[in-house]
Image (cartoon, coloured by chain):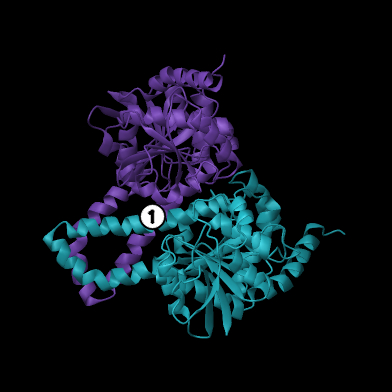
Chain colours: A cyan, B purple
Amino acid sequence: MTRVAVDAMGGDRAPEEVVAGALEAAADGIEPILFGPAGLDTGDLELVETTQVISMDEKPAEAVRAKPDSSLVAACRAVGEGNADAVVSAGNTGGMLAACFLELRRLPTVARPAIAVVIPAKKGPSVLIDSGANADARPEHLLQFAHMGAVFAEEVLEIRDPEVRLLSIGEEPEKGNQLTLEAHALLAADEGLRFGGNTESRSLLLGAADVVVCDGFTGNVVLKLLEGTIMTVLDALREEIVATRRGRIGGLLIRPAARGMRSRLDPDTYGGAYLLGLRGLAVIAHGNSSPLAIANAIRLAARGVEHDVVGRLAQRLPERVLASARSEAPGK
Amino acid sequence: MTRVAVDAMGGDRAPEEVVAGALEAAADGIEPILFGPAGLDTGDLELVETTQVISMDEKPAEAVRAKPDSSLVAACRAVGEGNADAVVSAGNTGGMLAACFLELRRLPTVARPAIAVVIPAKKGPSVLIDSGANADARPEHLLQFAHMGAVFAEEVLEIRDPEVRLLSIGEEPEKGNQLTLEAHALLAADEGLRFGGNTESRSLLLGAADVVVCDGFTGNVVLKLLEGTIMTVLDALREEIVATRRGRIGGLLIRPAARGMRSRLDPDTYGGAYLLGLRGLAVIAHGNSSPLAIANAIRLAARGVEHDVVGRLAQRLPERVLASARSEAPGK
């Protein structure tokens, strides 16, 4: 049984809907362990009692330091101490990052852990990395994100020899800002990557590449814009449709098609994002996660454990970094 | 009559569809003047003969320097020399920027011209600035973009006392990267702006603010992602709908509603973006502009001339910059 520590107090709809999601996921060889206050009704799931709570708007680093027995920090510690295989929280994202850095620690070869999220692109799933862990990044960090994303695409999405592209403002190598220009050169020189050059954001939802690399500020803006735009377009269309009688009848007829697409594009379907580069597996779920989103985040965590994402990263990243170091110094 | 210089050879569909768009716009007091090769059929519109063409993939600065008699550069020069009131091109964007800097020159108070584009948000039009002129920008540039965007919103969109927000990865002032953290402090301290704090990309299409400020890399990624996502979602929905007989019937019934929304969100409806901060008015149209998009870009240019956007920027920007300087040194 894969044991997944779940922060029962994390997220806008905690604890009720988090518990509901955990109960939904408690099957298929997954054993969610809830972290929350004494007396919390967790059905037949194990509860680890915690005495503190980190709210959504607390300052991350301070909150994590001040509240070692919060549900968030305790759930992360359970993975660090080997009492759980992975951790899931829909709580304060910055808090989750800080708690993971503290309790799980970085893999020795990783300079900067990064958030990898799966985009439900039309051509198939695509990994966007970093989608928010590093608001400022250097070119060599982007190179590591590329390697982590490639390992993730290979191991979890089972994409053989994934193509990596750099998100920029033009496909030509000379289009971009200082960061992408320098990162482009590093990526292009790396023999361990199948680098396809730059990609524009225009084609992200269509399927720009198996792995799309960017700094965490850009990635976070992209992720939120994707989610917001998809929902705004579908809502606006629904409003236009229900405004006329003819439209309402048509709307009933297209409902199955619209539902299918909405569910494919709904972030709840994916549930969460991996925080990669640590010695343990962590999944960051949406702040306003529904029970379905929580259940899917727990399933995502379990899948990562089954595929031993952390082990494979630890194993393959040094090779890749070595290969990259070799390719940077061809004459030596 | 407002005279708008049009680069007939700019864009993926040039020259035929550019000429068609110019013919469509030649009404309502607008006089398009086409710049292109001798013999080009421009109907009853004036043709200024040029001997060179800058293609979409040429290196901007070099191309502009090497081809002073290209349709793009000559059209810009017509404005600089007072032979036209504004210029429109759907050609090489970098080339357009370089030609404008060369032929139109900056306003004396502007450090960095910026591209302002109107986003068709649900709550009403919203100005995104900079959407691509400056891939790298400093905090004080973002402050100037904010002022230019506010003047644009007031004068062209007729929004009284527009609210300005800074695009970042969280609404709290401490969320962001180094650039936005510093820019936030400058914006908040400026008494000449109605600054509403940070906004997230999630709400851009809903209507985050009257003016949304960011660096040109982020703005360009945002703009292209918005356009790409809207089109991908609508196309995917259509595919799901036509996949079943029931869906096809429903699709016919909702067609008017879907068309209404598609046209509201279609970038062709806006036609182009203003390049602000120069001594003349320039509109950059989409590379794959349709005749409708070209016509609307020409109308946008004419509206900017009627509202004397350049004059008002020249007039109001010094006041605003002065006000901002005052607010930075309250004790002096």
Residue extending farthest left: A245
A221 is higher (above) or lower (below) than B277? below
Q: Total number of numbered labels? A: 1
Q: Is residue A142 left or right of residue B21?
A: right
Residue B176, quarter of picture: top right
Q: Where in the figure is residue A76, as x and y percent of width and height?
A: 61, 67
Q: Who is closer to the viewer here, A115 or B294?
A: A115
- The quadrant of the image that shows the N terminus of chain B is top left
Residue extending farthest right: A332
A116 is higher (above) or lower (below) than B186? below
Q: Where in the figure is residue B23, as x and y percent of width and height?
A: 27, 37
Residue A244, quarter of picture: bottom left
The answer to whether residue B33 shows anywhere in this view is no
Q: Is residue B227 left or right of residue A126?
A: left
Tag 1: residue type? Thr
Q: Is residue A241 left or right of residue B137?
A: left
- Residue at the (45%, 63%) spot, across then down: A206
The answer to whether residue A322 shows anywhere in this view is yes
- Residue at the (26%, 53%) spot, across then down: B261
Q: Who is closer to the viewer here, A201 or A66?
A: A66
The chain carrying label 1 is: A
Q: Which residue is mark 1?
A: A229
Residue extending farthest top: B332
